[in-house]
Image (cartoon, rainbow, N blue to C red):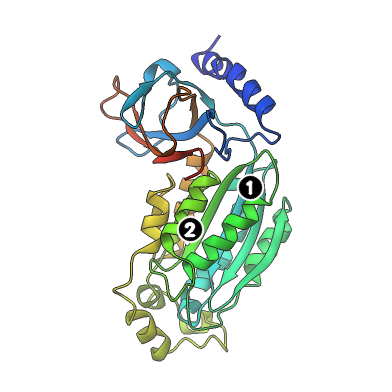
Amino acid sequence: MSSTTTFQRSCLRARLLLAAALACFGQDVTFRSTVPLVVAPVTVTGPDGRPMDGLTERDFHLLDNGIPRRIGGEILIEPLALVVAVQTSEASAAALTKIRRIGSMIHPLITGKRGSAAILAFDEEIRLVQEFTSSEDLISGAFQSLRPRGGRGRILDAVDRSVRLLRDGPPRHRRVILLVGEQKDSRSESRIEEVLTEAQRENITIYALTYSPVLTGLTVKSHELPPSSGMNLLALFSHLAHHGKENAAETLTRYTGGRRIGFVRQNALEDAVSAIGEELHSQYLLSFSPPPETPAGYRAIEVRVPGRPDARVRTRPGYWLGEP
């Protein structure tokens, strides 16, 4: 029997307990009970950035607020529910010519046959372009329909809407948001600390593909822009006027266990989509139960692989125990 199979079986009993305790089981669980089973997806890569396979629960060391916990784990196999939130403000016209081409990659590389995706567009408004679907054609068609409009990029409001979509979306699915837009938010009504709290509470991992409207504009030929794109200096200067705002994309990804990847050219964008898909489908699932006397509140998670000093480990930074 392979070490991976042993690793999967070691977590089966814990998973059955979780399914009995909660009506809806998935890799992502809303931890609001007094003593939850905490589940964390863990990405382990080598120095070359490639996923590190073949690890068992004995290879991991997990700290809960600095306290070692006994863990179980497995390779993730749950279907994935994905919300792709794409910025469609006027300054994004050049980037959208590239982004529309990755629609056909979402289903085969990220959601897979058992998963589903919903597509949001955001600028001055937040619009649901495509509800959750497993159809590659519908996902690709939703991307093809994206056009620049509006003058702002309300990243935080878009992520807030994405969180609510996932909360009410397909049950027993892992929850992931893929944000495609600028790094900085523009005039959202939502507060970043509130958006992060809800994303963590709902156990959602956020990834971001980000670009600079100025740089991407230099890599697109004039005939590739839509005739009414509105790509003009006013939109670009409006973007630059907000350069001092908080880097929302970096913060959202860092504090939910995802990552941000920047792109300028088409091949870099496609490589980034492939990398995120590979990561999501090669993660380890670690679980542990805090003792009943553990104080309520937000608690930090740290995962190490002591026997592999060359390993790079990333996971969700923490979880809520009880109501925050």
Quarter location, residue 48: top left
- The residue closer to the viewer here, 36 or 124, is 36
Mark 2 residue type: Val
The label on residue 151 is none
Q: Amino acid at mark 1?
A: Ala
Observer-nearest of 263 and 198: 198
Tell me the residue that label 2 is attached to. 195
Residue 78: image quadrant is top right
Give the Cα distance between marks 1 and 2: 19 Å
Left or right of 19 in this view: 198: left
Is residue 80 positioned above or below 192 on the image? above
Task: Give the x, y percent position of residue 126.
Answer: 59, 72
The residue that label 1 is drawn on is 81
Counting from the top left corner in percent of width and height, residue 131 is at: 71, 60
Count the numbered circles shown. 2
- In this view, the residue in front, 36 or 301, is 36
Q: Nearer the viewer, mark 1 or mark 2?
A: 2
Q: Residue at x 30, y 23 (%)?
A: 308
SS for callout 1: strand
